[in-house]
Image: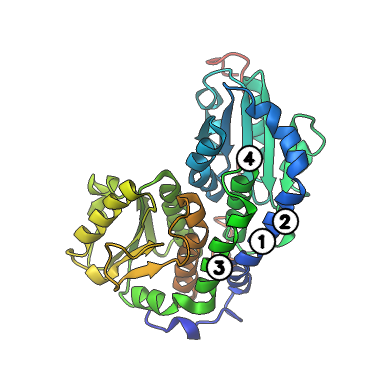
Amino acid sequence: MTTPTHTMTPQGRGADHTAAEIAQQPGVWREVGTIVSRARDSLDTFLKPLLAQEDLRIVLTGAGTSAFAGEVVRAALARATGRRVDAVPTTDIVADPHASFPDDTPTLLVSFARSGDSPESVAATRLAEQVLTRVSHLVITCNSSGHLAQAHHENTTSYVLLMPAAANDRGFAMTSSFTSMLLASLLTFGALGTDGIEAPAAAAEHITAGGLDQAIDTLLAHHCKRLVYLGSSSALKGLAQESALKLLELTGGGLVASSETSLGFRHGPKSVLTDHTAVVVYVSNDPYTRRYDLDIIAELRTGPAPAAVVAVTASPDGLPEDGTWLLPGLTDADDAALALPAVLTAQLIALRSSMARGIPSDNPFPSGEVNRVVQGVTVHPLPERRGDVA
């Protein structure tokens, strides 16, 4: 784990796709901005009548990383639209559609999907139509030929927004697909203007150009056996969940990873701390929420491994220089926009950790026990009346 980051190149080590897809993200984000700008008129034609309904419910859905994209943007979209916005995974919708849609209210189901080929993707949209009287669909996907895109391509109550071809990651784990779809939703609903892309992109380029290489080296040099991600705001809590998943995926489960909020961590999950536990705290830009992040950082730095506590932040205020990973130019950014470059730190930690263990990041499960596109799911028919099981 002490190998310097700059010597750990992916070539020939089964990480070519993953490394390239992490590095390409700033450029892909600019492409996303162009795509949404060109689609603006048709998007507005589709969305304005829906958003005009005061009782509209917007449900953000997806599975795994795609579900976390919804959690990251949920609060920002609620503020931008003035409508109720909930993040509900497709896995919850398929398993219990009536609980996911408890009220027959007008609903816009926003589906995030890299491939759109996982069994739950199309099933969730069909179940929404079965349970709800009035439902429309915004499909944000990276795969034009996926089942989800094809199912909604000619549906008059649907809009399919395709991401750049490069966003359809070839590696096992979602990296550029995650950030591209997240960004697209912010742009689509006006939570971020196209002129707001440049600051996150510049911060991400600082990271991909090696701006945090030494910092990542230092963290991994602590021989971490466990890693915890913390985030307090809704957006950064979703980011923490995605970050933990990325480490689990790319190390093939070899590194134990978990996530929590800064306040929630004290209520039991703090039991994970040992001399070999690293903690990464995503520090909120909201002045009130930020205070709780600073509190937990100060507390943890008096613990068993103070040097293994990292703050990822847009502002160094209230933080010591050591262990503070700065995302430049984003002090005024919403936490959902801050998540765009911040997640690159987690992606690189996961990539470097997998390479250090000799695990091919592009396919960390060569025996197929975990798949790039989920397999083995049987979608059962929903009875006409709740409680009637065939």
10 Å neighbourhood of mark 1: few (<14), some, or many (≥20)? some
- Can see residue 360? no
Picture layout, residue 239 above or below residue 124 = below
Three-letter amino acid code at the position of disc 1: Arg
Q: CA distance from mark 2 to mark 1?
A: 6 Å
Instruction: Name which of mark 2 and mark 4 comes first in the sequence.
Output: 2
Going by the image, does 296 lie left or right of 389?
Answer: left
* Number of the front mark, 1 or 4: 1
Quick one: SS at disc 2? helix
Q: Quadrant of the N terminus?
A: bottom left
Instruction: Name which of mark 1 and mark 4 comes first in the sequence.
Output: 1
Q: Which mark is residue 202?
A: 3
Q: CA distance from mark 1 to mark 4?
A: 22 Å
Disc 2 + disc 1, Cβ < 8 Å: yes
Three-letter amino acid code at the position of disc 2: Thr
Q: At x 44% / y 69%, what residue is drawn?
A: 349
Going by the image, does 207 lie left or right of 171?
Answer: left
Q: At x 48% / y 65%, what residue is drawn?
A: 329
In the rendered image, residue 275, in percent from the top left (x then y), is placed at 22, 67
Disc 3 + disc 1, Cβ < 8 Å: no
Q: CA distance from mark 4 to mark 3?
A: 28 Å
* Residue where numbered disc 1 is placed: 30
Three-letter amino acid code at the position of disc 4: Ser
In the rendered image, residue 67, in percent from the top left (x then y), is placed at 53, 44
- Looking at the image, which is closer to me, 286 or 180? 286
* Residue where numbered disc 2 is placed: 34
Q: At x 65% / y 51%, what residue is drawn?
A: 114
Q: Which mark is residue 111?
A: 4
Q: At x 58% / y 49%, what residue is drawn?
A: 192
